[in-house]
Image (cartoon, rainbow, N blue to C red):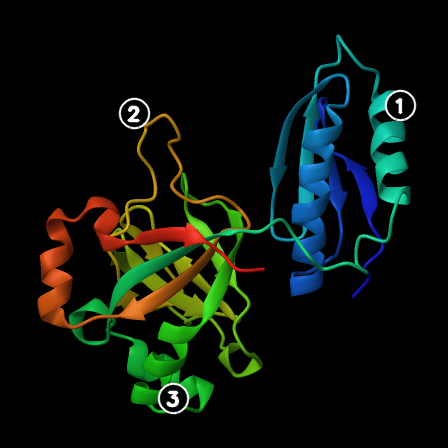
Amino acid sequence: MSHMPAILPLGTEGYLVRFADQLDDVANRAVLRFATEVEADEIAGVLEVSTALASVFVRFDRGVAARKDIVNSLQALLNSRDWFADTKIQPARLWRVPALYGGDAGPQLREAAELAGVSQEAAVRELSQSRVRVLALGFAPGQPYLGMLPEHWNIGRQAELTPSVPAGALVIAVRQLVLFANPSPTGWRQIALTKLPLFDVNAEHPFALTAGDELVFEAVSEHDFALLETENMGGAKLEEAAT
């Protein structure tokens, strides 16, 4: 896998700055740091900066800046440092999210644990203590891809789709977790359920999460999970993450 950033045209008003040809933790950290710097530099003509797992999308106004000027500005920023040498990113927010593992809430937990080579009980202990980062938002408004989990969680997707998982479903594959914003089909295995609302179109900030945020999905009992129905943010607690 190459870690050499590349600037690629995307449509008539955008560029994709690609840091790797597949996801890894170092590339994703570089993506988040680079996107932050592009926004901070306030490059003339730039209208939007958004991140994906291993790339940054930059949209610009052709009436304000020529393509060559955008490319020159992005290349100068890329050349200003080694984006892969320093893996630190801005101190993140840390969310502690109550999650109900197994049973009807996580019907494929046992199968996922077996594929990872651990018992169901060990899987819950490990996953409920793992601190994962929002690598990117996508697929549905506010929906996070989270990682990276240890190597033994590099389990494949299912051969068949699950027709629908509910909003708040926590699913697992390829060393990542996805927390579903809406009911949806998926090829990933559902291991738990949360009540964290991810998107509110009427809110000042419609997305609850931001790329770079960190989450811990803490295991709770069925009784305690039922009580979260009336809790703000589904019982999720927000704090500043330690660096």
Q: Earlier in the sequence, mark 2 or mark 3?
A: 3
* Residue name at image x 35 percent, y 88 percent: 122
- Residue 40 seen from this side: yes
Q: CA distance from mark 2 to mark 3?
A: 42 Å
* Residue name at image x 16 percent, y 49 percent: 231
**Frontmost residue, 89 versus 102:** 89
* Residue name at image x 73 percent, y 33 percent: 38
* Residue located beneath label 3 in the image: 114
Q: CA distance from mark 1 to mark 2?
A: 38 Å
> Which element carries disc 1, helix, strand or loop?
helix
Tally the numbered discs. Answer: 3
* Residue 3 to residue 141: above or below: below
Which quadrant of the figure has residue 29? Answer: bottom right
Percent x, y of residue 11: 70, 28
Quadrant showing the N terminus? bottom right
- Name the amino acid type tagged 1: Lys
Query: Which mark is drawn over residue 68?
Result: 1
Which quadrant of the figure has residue 216? Answer: bottom left
**Frontmost residue, 29 versus 12:** 29
- Residue 191 seen from this side: no
- Work out which residue is located at the far top of the displayed protein and give it: 63
Q: Count residues near mark 2 (Cα–Cα under 10 Å), then give few for <14, some for 14-19, many for 20+.
A: few
Q: CA distance from mark 3 to mark 1?
A: 52 Å
> Which element carries disc 2, helix, strand or loop?
loop
> Which element carries disc 3, helix, strand or loop?
helix
* Residue 36 to residue 152: above or below: above
* Residue 147 to residue 63: above or below: below
- Name the amino acid type tagged 3: Glu
Percent x, y of residue 9: 78, 33
**Frontmost residue, 115 versus 105:** 105
* Residue located beneath label 2 in the image: 202
